[in-house]
Image (tube, grey):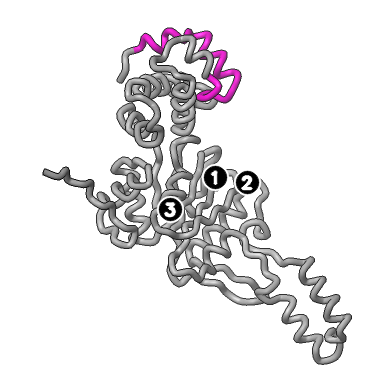
């Protein structure tokens, strides 16, 4: 008797339930709990921006990457930072190219008389427009809408937040010299925040919202099994248990899922089958990235991490 094959995961276009989202994300190696899967389902079906908040390393950015891979749409990433403005986020003019075009026109005599007005119009046409992430997403003309990732919006300032709110409310961008670019089908928008500061209520009201927690012990073991298949189940359980304790120690930078994966892979690469104090000490830099955190863990005692019962 032939073994039954696993059911084929749903396509992005066929999503009709939260379970479809769970299955679709899992097929792309992302394990979402019911709350996150529900938020993503609503973002897909309602075409509403989804704001994901949580500590660094819990998998917020990865959601956008997985949705792009699943849907087949282009991932357009806007990395926010202090001082970001319209020229970096929306558009700017290619002044070097405009100048070259102008000098060519002067050399051929097209820059004088009646041709001068036409030349000015040419200089401020789409030909010389440099589209930045927001304009790329709103003016996209492909068959599959893109996934727009607005990453770490909490690093931007109030003025940029206000502009972003306007853009996401209308899914349109206006370039005064050309006109409006409006998305016929709104892109899927994922906005992330590490909550280094509070994002304004107006932007949050425009978005669906979900706080992304660190995974439970059982889910983290499952993630390790899916994303790091070279790691034994026993080692994965030990790594997940110790990582869970590290997150409860009030460290400067608690380890995220990415650090858990890196640590498990490093241990497996070294041939470690069972965690002990020596293997933890030798590989601590794979899971903790600050000297102060290393000192705190070592002062507490590495053996204590191993002595604590697993969840």
> Label 1, label 2: how many angstroms apart (C-alpha)?
8 Å
> Label 1, label 3: how many angstroms apart (C-alpha)?
21 Å
Label whose residue precedes the other's in the sequence (1 or 2):
2
Q: Position of residue 235 (x, y in %)?
A: 37, 21
- Circle on res. 306: none
Please state if 103 lies on the left or on the right of 200 as rendered.
right
Residue occupying the point 55% across, 72% down: 181
Q: Which residue is mark 1?
A: 152
Label 1 neighbourhood size at 10 Å, few (<14), some (14-19), many (20+)? many
Residue occupying the point 51% across, 49% down: 200
Q: Is residue 298 magenta?
A: yes
Asked if the residues shown at circle 1 and circle 2 are in contact, with their CB atoms under 8 angstroms apart, the answer is yes
- Circle on res. 81: 2
The residue stretch that appears in magenta:
284-308
Label 2 neighbourhood size at 10 Å, few (<14), some (14-19), many (20+)? some
- Circle on res. 69: 3
Label 3 neighbourhood size at 10 Å, few (<14), some (14-19), many (20+)? some
Q: Position of residue 289 (x, y in %)?
A: 57, 25
Label whose residue precedes the other's in the sequence (2 or 3):
3
**Quarter of image, res 135:** bottom right
């Amino acid at each position: 008797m032939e073994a039954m094959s696993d059911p084929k995961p749903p396509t992005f276009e066929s999503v009709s339930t939260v379970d479809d989202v769970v299955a679709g994300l899992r097929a792309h190696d992302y394990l979402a709990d019911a709350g996150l899967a529900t938020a993503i389902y609503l973002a897909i079906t309602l075409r509403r921006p989804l704001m994901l908040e949580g500590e660094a390393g819990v998998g917020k950015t990865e959601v956008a990457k997985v949705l792009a891979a699943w849907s087949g749409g282009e991932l357009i990433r806007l990395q926010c930072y202090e001082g970001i403005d319209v020229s970096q986020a929306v558009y700017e003019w290619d002044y070097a190219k405009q100048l070259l075009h102008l000098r060519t026109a002067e050399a051929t005599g097209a820059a004088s008389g009646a041709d001068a007005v036409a030349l000015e119009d040419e200089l401020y046409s789409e030909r010389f427009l440099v589209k930045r992430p927001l304009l790329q997403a709103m003016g996209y003309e492909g068959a599959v809408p893109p996934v727009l990732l607005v990453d770490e919006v909490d690093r931007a300032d109030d003025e940029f937040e206000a502009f972003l709110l306007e853009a996401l409310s209308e899914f349109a961008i206006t370039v005064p010299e050309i006109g409006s670019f409006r998305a016929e089908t709104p892109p899927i928008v994922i906005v992330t925040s590490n909550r280094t500061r509070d994002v304004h209520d107006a932007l949050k009201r425009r978005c669906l919202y979900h706080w992304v927690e660190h995974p439970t012990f059982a889910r983290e073991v499952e993630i390790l099994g899916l994303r790091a298949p070279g790691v034994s189940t026993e080692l994965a359980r030990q790594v997940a248990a110790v990582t869970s304790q590290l997150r409860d120690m009030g460290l400067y930078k608690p380890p995220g899922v990415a650090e858990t994966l890196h640590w498990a892979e490093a241990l497996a690469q070294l041939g470690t089958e069972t965690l002990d104090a020596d293997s933890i000490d030798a590989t601590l830099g794979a899971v903790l990235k600050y000297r102060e955190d290393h000192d705190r863990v070592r002062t507490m005692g590495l053996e204590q991490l191993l002595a604590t019962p697993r969840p």
